[in-house]
Amino acid sequence: MPLAGTGAIVTPAARAARGVGAFNVIQLEHAQAIVAGAEAAEAPVVLQLSENAVRYHGALAPIAAAVLATARTAAVPVAVHLDHATSAELVAEAVRLGFSSVMFDASALPYEENVRTTAEVVDHCHAAGVWVEAELGEVGGKDGVHAPGARTDPAEAAAFTAATGVDALAVAVGSSHAMLTRDAVLDFDLIADLRAAVPVPLVLHGSSGVADEHLTRAVERGMTKVNIATQLNRVFTGAVRRTLDDAPALVDTRRYLGPGRTAVATEVTRLLHVLKARPA
């Protein structure tokens, strides 16, 4: 199947009040597992490479080539997305390599500078047919959109979207990145207010810290693209740890990375059902 466009996956889901799982890739096993899980759920999916993952690999091109190739072999629509890029140069490279979308994160900047730099990235990406997600930080750029207690103002979100031309907006509604517990408290009324005020799909970051029933409710109230990373890493690491505990003499990496990959695929399928991601 050809590589899917992120907008072609997310925009119809927003209209139908379905969620879209956007899962972060660190190594090839992640990409393979996410695609396998999406195929089992019969749902589209977004594979994400973050700026941190690029830093881990030392360059974007090698891991991007593997992820793009994996996406193209899938039996369901799969899009490839650059997540949390703070560098316009990295965005430009992702566009050249064939990513269908990017998330440009200027949320740590003061509001006016966030608007200016994001609009410049949007112009470049739209000229290449690439969809852009952005993040609206607190006014003043203190700690970004997911600082503890941060909440996105609907009127400001609408103004930011209009000023920048972004295709999707990450908003602060109570989640936080890298949570190892699933007890984040979401503001569902705020999600509904943001959905009513903002004309583009909403994105929930830090979704690993949100309980299943709250993820479903968030989608029902208006959230569409749901980013999940830490939860998959927990599942992957747990399976690897159990395998090595059971066989401490094991040295063949395939024998313990394989169970990690299988566990992640199962979790992706489960989460896609939670998000109501399968098209009717």
Image: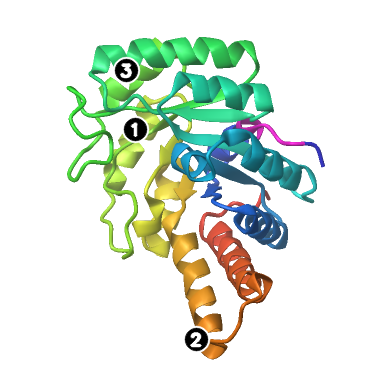
> On the rendered image, what quadrant is the N terminus found in?
top right
The answer to which of 177 and 187 lies nearer the viewer is 177
Part of the protein shown in magenta: 3-9
In three-dimensional space, the C-alpha distance between marks 2 and 3, rounded to whole angstroms, equals 48 Å
Q: Which residue is mark 3?
A: 114
- Amino acid on which disc 2 is placed: Asp
User: Does residue 140 lie above or below 271 as drawn?
Assistant: above
Residue 264 visible in the snapshot: yes
* Foreground: disc 1 or disc 3: 3
Q: Circles 2 and 3: CB distance less than 8 Å?
A: no
What is the secondary structure assignment of the residue under circle 1? helix
Mark positioned earlier in the residue sequence (1 or 3): 3
Q: Circles 2 and 1: CB distance less than 8 Å?
A: no
Q: Which residue is mark 2?
A: 245
Q: Which residue is mark 1?
A: 194
In three-dimensional space, the C-alpha distance between marks 2 and 1, rounded to whole angstroms, equals 47 Å
As for residue 7 lying within the magenta part, the answer is yes
What is the secondary structure assignment of the residue under circle 2? helix
- Amino acid on which disc 1 is placed: Leu
User: Does residue 238 lie above or below 230 as drawn?
Assistant: below
In the picture provided, is 232 more to the left or to the right than 97?
A: left
What is the secondary structure assignment of the residue under circle 3? helix
The answer to which of 220 and 166 lies nearer the viewer is 166
Mark positioned earlier in the residue sequence (2 or 3): 3
The answer to which of 38 and 61 lies nearer the viewer is 61
Residue 78 visible in the snapshot: no
Mark positioned earlier in the residue sequence (2 or 1): 1
The numbered mark at residue 28 is none
Q: Residue at x 34, y 24 (%)?
A: 106
Q: Position of residue 165 (x, y in %)?
A: 46, 14
- Amino acid on which disc 3 is placed: Asn
